[in-house]
Structure formats: C-alpha cells, structure tokens
Image (tube, rainbow, N blue to C red):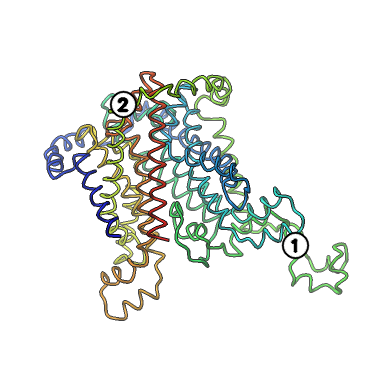
Amino acid sequence: MWSFSILFLTAFIWSINKVNLTPQGVIEIFRGWPETQDLLARMWPPFIPSEDLNVVVKAVWDTFLMAFAGTFLGLILGIPLGLLAAKNVMPLAFIRFLSRVTIVFARAIPALVFALFFVRVYGIGPLAGILALGLHSIGMIGKLITDAAEEIDSGPREGVTSTGASGFQDTITGVWSQIVPTAIAVGLYRLEICFRAANILGWVGAGGIGVIFRGYQGNLRYQEMLGVTLLITLMVILMELLSAITRHTLLGTTKNTVKKTPMLGSRFFSGNRSQSMLRGGHLERNSIGTKLANIIVRKPQPTITEISKLDSVEDSHNIHSPHFKKSKVQLTQPWTSDRVKVNLVGLSLFSLLVLSLTQPGDGISSVWGELFTGSGKFPEFLGRVTPDDWSWFTDRIVSDMLETIAIGLASTTIALIFAIPFAFLAASNTAPGKFIYRVSRFFNLSVRCLPELVLAVIFVAAIGPGPKTGTIAMAIGMFGFVVKLFSDTIEEAKQNIRDGVTSTGSTRIQESVTGVFPQVAPSLFSNSLYLFDVSIRSSTVIGIVGGGGIGFLTINAAKTLNFETLGGIIFCIFVVVYAIELLSSWLRRKFVS
C-alpha cells in the first residue's frame, strides 16, 4: 500500500506540473481575476432574446428526444451484448470475448468523438447525435447488465432447465426475469446521462441546444450564453427529478439482504435502492418492480390460501368448478393502483419513444431517411479513417495524450480533496443538521448538472485556453459526481458500529472518522479508481474548446478532413482508456477484494 501511495503522489505531482497548476500557475489565475470579473459583468444579467425563444425551446425539446432515442438504441443493443458477455449465459468463449471488446470500445470512446464521426457520414443534424449517444450507451448498459447477469440466483435457472427448457427459454425465464429491475434502473439513469451529454453534441453539429450555445459563444453573446447555460441546468435538474420519481414508481424500495463489495459502476444510481439491487440486494416481494417482472415472465396463479377455500382437492384442479368460482380467484392481474401507475408510466415512455423517433429535426423523413441514404457512405468512410501506416503517429499526438492523462489525474485528485469532506455534509447520517444536509445536496445537484464542456467554455473565456483551464473545469464537474457517489456510500454505513463509537463519548467528528470512514474506505477507493477512468474519457473532449489535451487535434483533424489522423487519434484514445481500465481493475482486485 505504501508503494502505491508513493507512486500516486509522484504521478499527482507530475500531473500538476504538466497542466501548470503549480503555485506560480495558481497565482496567475488570481492575477487574472479582473478579466474574470469583467467577463461575469458582461454575462449578467442572463437572458434569452424573445426572437430566439421559440428556437431555443424547440432545441431543448429536440435535445431531450435525442437523449431518449439514444438511450433506447443503447438498451436494445447493450442488453443483448451484456447477456452474451456473461459467463453463465454464453458458454462460447469467443462470442463472450467479442461482446466484451464491443462493450469496452463503446465505453472507451466519448460520445462527442462518436458524434464527430457520424457528422461526417450522415451530415449535420440530430441523427448523428442519436447514433453517438446510442453507441456510447452500449458501454455502460452492457457492462452493468453483464455484472447483474453473472450475480443472479442460480436456483430459478435450475428449476427452469429441469423442465426441459431450451437455452433461449432458460435465458428469458431464468436470467432475464431476475434482472428486469436492474435493466429498468440502468435505463432510467442512462437517460439522465444521455440528456447531459446531448447538450454538448451540437458543438460538433450533432443537433440539439449545443448548436445554439456554440453560436452564442462564437459571437461573444455572453448574456445569451449564460441564459442557455442556466436553462440547460434547470432542465437537467428537472430531468433528474422526473427520473427519480419514475424509478421510485417502477422499482419501489429494496431490502439489502446481501452485503458485497460494490462492483464497477454500482454507484451510478441515485439513492440506495438501485445500488443494493446491483450489489446483490433483492427487491421486496410487494415492490412494483417485482410485480412488473411477474407480469412479464409469467401469469399470476391462485394463492395457497385461496385454493384452500375450495370444497375438495379435486376441485382445485378444475378451474371450471363452481366451488372454484365461488372463491373469487382471479387468473388475470387485478387493476390495483400500483398496476395503473406502472401502465401509465409504460404508456408515457412509449409515447416519448414514438416522438423521439419522429420529431427531432424536421421529422422522420429528413432524419431517419438519412440513416438509409447515408449508410452507403459508411464503409467508404470507415476505410478512410483507417490509417494505412504510422505516419500520423507524431510527437504532438504523444504529447497531447500525456497532457490528457495529466488533466484527468489532476482534476480527479483535486475533486477528491474537496469532495470527500463535503460528502459527509451531504450524507443524511453524518450531516450536522437537516438544513446543512439539504443545502449541501441542492448545491451539489446544481454543480453536477453543469456539463464540463460548458464550464470549459466559460473558463477559457475568463482565463484563456490551455490545460490549466481544462483541469479546473474538469475538477468542478467531477466534484459534483464525486460528492454524489461518496455521500450515497456514507449513508450505507452500519449504525451499530457508529453507536459503539458514540457510547465512548466521542464527538461528531471523531464518530465520522473512526465509526464511518473505516467502513466506507474500500468503496471510496474503488469509486476513486472508476472516477479516474471517467475523467480520462471526459478530458479527451475538453480540448475541443481550448481546454488542452487531445481534443484540439481531434476537432482539427475532422475540420481539415484529415481522416487518417482522426482514426489514429480515436485508436490512441481507446488504447489509453482501455489500459487505464485494466490497471484500475487490477488495483481494485488487489486492494479492495
């Protein structure tokens, strides 16, 4: 552990020097405060011109529909791939390998890079954004579905196979029926992520509100830019609240019956409900999620109590018996309030799906028609972005990739330094009071809803371009994410251990340090490794607006039609992110498991 600490400290010092956040660099930021103050004065008060209001509202609606369609695409592709990658579902190792490689590739390449690719194939418009969001969503959805499938209870599967069921029937009835609640939670949270990501895809011409935001930024219309930023933040907050309500309606509450070390990605979900589900917890028998799974996989049967009311055992096998009818046994699901809620949610989601497939842009004829007309260019373009040799691999690419890694490491560490203490204020069981808890949660929600690229645009305008600017923007963006994950982890600390510490007369701080922190330390370490993985992927796009890293070369290669260099950069991003993921997995097994 000491050797790892020394290596980490050395890497952090290197990253700080690489991005110029040394004491001298920090002093330069404060010296630039007058310029920042001048920018804030030009941005205030925020507003959206009345002549642009209809266009902005439509763009926000198109952004939401893009996110919904992208999430749907990710689900229909990611769920089968996730099942094919599970060891207990697919016996063929080669197919499992191909599925896992596809999932890792989709997770490693940022959605903005996918959008750059599809804009060149299908042209400017929301179709490129939908495809980018859908393919990138495969990474997260496939990973979590694989983990959920490999942790199911084997008992129901053994019962299904004992009846002579085929492999497909076993997968649907014995596996899928157990992970339906997980799939619902994954889909809802992925919709939140896609909506935040869709706000910036317009920066490269992939439709949505990002196109308008980029126009305001390019014309130095800072008041309008801040107005759109606040509108995006408000919509993300509303989106998260609606998602939380939907998740609560469909999944109910859970009982954490099995305590396991959190897997990669198990902290994605808001609240303890979905977290316990992904770590081995089970939904309560009366939860709506369980009822929904029962509706999908089997017809409801009469209960033992109802059957016992019959006059004879023989009549219990004859559903046409008069005695059976007198018992008022219903073989169809009754229309309870819970079932009405589930069906209303399902109808609403289906309506949104229809709208998302028909409404973005100028309608289905202009958007989805391009999918068929532009697909003919795909093989040709794929050949153009595949490098013929290594002439594209220059010292500049190596330097920018190292800078990208430095931005990710420095921003993650800075975010951790500030977020870990703040997470104790944002956790309901360690906050000094309800008021501080609520204020901390609301502040963190506001910070978390700001896209990193929007923050980078503001900081570039305030203190100038460079890796220092990108690191600060990334650190602020990661702060909200870190606080959310860590506060949820802290809220799961066992109360009996804390009571033992409190009984010794310890103060609130001593109780948190000795009674809470040791319990959550393994989870904090595991989540920190995952956050570093996320920050590396996010930092690859910060350079698009001048935040340093490989993003600047990426956007320039696309603009100048230097497709071989673009393909080479995408390959480098994949290799670096995949290597970091392997390193993180090894460290997690070594120090957490």
Q: As shown in the figure, which amino acid type bears the numbered disc 1?
A: Gln
**Nearest to the observer: residue 346 or residue 160:** 160
Q: Earlier in the sequence, mark 1 or mark 2?
A: 1
- Are there few (<14), some (14-19), or many (20+) residues within 10 Å of tag 2? few
Along the line of sight, which residue is nearer the eye, 566 or 505?
Answer: 566
Picture layout, residue 563 above or below residue 130: above
Select label 1 or label 2 by which is in front.
Answer: 2
Q: Residue at the spot x=41%, y=36% of the render? A: 574
Which percent across, then down, holds residue 511?
Answer: 29, 72
- Quadrant of residue 387 within the rendered picture: top left
205 vs 159: above or below: above
Dot label at residue 394: 2
Q: Which residue is found at the position 34% from the left and 56% from the top?
A: 441
Q: CA distance from mark 1 to mark 2?
A: 67 Å
| SS under mark 2 | loop
Residue at 54% in and 30% down: 359
For the C terminus, the image quarter is: bottom left
Q: Which residue is mark 1?
A: 301
